Image (cartoon, rainbow, N blue to C red):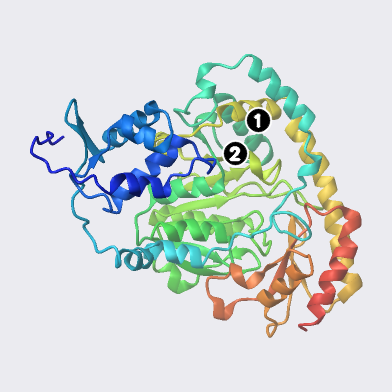
Amino acid sequence: MEPIKRNRVAKASTLPDFVLRQFDRHSGQPDHRQLYTILQGGIRQQVLAADTKLPPTRALAQALGIARNTVVHVYEQLALEGYVQAGVGRGTYVAAIGPRLVDRSAAPARARSALLSKRGSQLVSEARAARLQWGAFTPGVPEVRMFPTQVWSRLQARLARKHTPDQLTYATGPGDAGLRQAVSDYLQGTRGVVCSPEQVVITSGTQQSLHLVAQLLSDPGDKVWMEDPGYWGARSVLRAHGLDLQPVALDAEGMAPSPEQLRQPPRLMFVTPSHQYPLGALMGHGRRQQLLDYAAVHGVWVVEDDYDSEFRYGTRPLPALQGLDVHGRVVYLGTFSKTLFPALRIAYLVLPPDLVDGFARALNELFREGQTMQQAVLAQFLSEGHYATHIRRMRGVYSSRHDALIHAIGQEFGGQLPVIGGDAGLHLVLGLPPHVDDAAVADAAQRAGISTRPLSLYHLQQPAANKGLLLGYGAVPEEDIGPSFARLAQVVRGFL
């Protein structure tokens, strides 16, 4: 700090008036806060020039009718922040805060022009996340009202009584050991995943899993094969990391790369083989083996998103693609958002053994994970059989709601509009004629109190986009499906 100069010229004649004009004992604001704001503002705006001497604390307190200690406190705070300089027996002076680096009149315009980066602007302009996450017919939302909260609360209370300090601090590894064991047991028994608990890394949702995949297995500019149409959430994350997204057309079995695409291998391949999102195709064994062989030959990482395979109606789900992988090229993604409740924010990766340590380190380095207590509760929920019981119950509920929606569509349209991908998951697609603007239909439905999503938004190649509406039935009570769809049908007819 610059020493106080003895020969300073005091410029204090206007200071009391400057403060008195603004200070209001009846404003309701604390005296010290009000005085601090007045003096700090005057100095910052250079109304109180450098070297201006502030009145003695006793004199200013008497002039304002406040306690001297209040003024002392304000002066000390201003000195601490570098606005004033004080010396015993020398008084208190406004400090020289230096010239501004930019013209104040020009600064706002420059700030506005650089609010978002080019990448940030693209991300925001192409955002597809729905504003509403509940109600008929919001896609991808499970029935959370039937979640066994009493069982969960009991487990939570039991673990809270005997918690350890490491469960209340930052996580330092790939996740709760008990949950990794429970996830491994569950996947081997129900999804045909070949793994040990050591290959499981717990994350805070599929989006975080994808962030790790993009950061650790690719570099900006690398090619990624994406199903088209496909999951917009994966598209947003991978594009935000600077990857070159290559749309791959679908056939009856899902991703079907062309001969030209096969000649230019990607770095990553994102697939949903057990229930293609959003059209519902089921990839057969032959196609799965072809993609795995191609990945092994060309060093491609296959990212398998197995987001809701638990809910298939009429047939058993095919085992996971990962179970066929003998070359260690598949990164398997799973989540509890669809099977339990989205706000839980717990998902997992199953990785080839050589990747686990790197992913665990990156997870802790980039995200400083927690949720350790919740992970421990979920581990007990799985290991004690509550998860399997809940899945069985909800499979029956969703099957009935699925049938009710199919029936409602038939009642309103007969065979006029096709139903696509309606034998699994929590949604189906109502196809629309090519001339219909499905985004306009979804907007009109929103105004009528119905939430749906246009199929065209899931396409990377918009000119070739199919038209339709994604209809989620998971969170709609069976008795509400018919009346709700009748309202939507009225909207749709206005566009046919």
Residue 184 found in image quarter: top right
Quadrant (top left, top right, bottom left, bottom right) of the C terminus: bottom right
Q: Which of the two residues, 112 or 5, is positioned nearer the viewer here? A: 5
State how many labels appear. 2
Residue drawn at the location 70% of the way across and 72% of the way down: 443
Q: Is residue 54 above or below residue 469?
A: above
- Dots 1, 2 in contact, CB < 8 A: yes
Q: Name the element at disc 2.
A: loop
Answer with the quarter of the image where residue 255 lies.
bottom right
Which numbered tag is attached to residue 378?
1
Q: Secondary structure at mark 1?
A: helix
Residue 343: give its label: none
User: What residue appears at the point 61 percent right and 30 percent down from the top-left corner?
Assistant: 374
Q: Which residue is mark 2?
A: 346
Q: Give the farthest residue toward the left.
A: 7
Q: Amino acid at mark 2?
A: Ile
Measured in 3D between alpha carbons, the distance from the residue under mark 1 to the one under mark 2, in whole angstroms, is: 9 Å
447 or 44, nearer to the observer: 44
Amino acid type at circle 1 is Leu
Please determine whether, in this image, residue 306 is positioned above or below residue 446.
above
* Quadrant (top left, top right, bottom left, bottom right) of the N terminus: top left
Most distant residue in the top direction: 162
Would residue 211 appear left or right of 105 to someone viewing this image? right
Q: Residues within 10 Å of mark 1 (few under 14, many from 20)?
A: many
Neighbour tally class for label 2: few under 14, some 14-19, many 20 plus, Cα within 10 Å: many
Residue drawn at (55%, 81%) of the image? 463
Q: Classify residue 279 by image quadrant.
A: bottom right
Q: Position of residue 150 (x, y in %)?
A: 79, 29
Q: Nearer the viewer, residue 230 or 269?
A: 230
Q: Earlier in the sequence, mark 1 or mark 2?
A: 2
Q: Percent from the top left, x then y, of residue 102?
A: 23, 61
**Residue 180 pos. (x, y %):** 57, 30
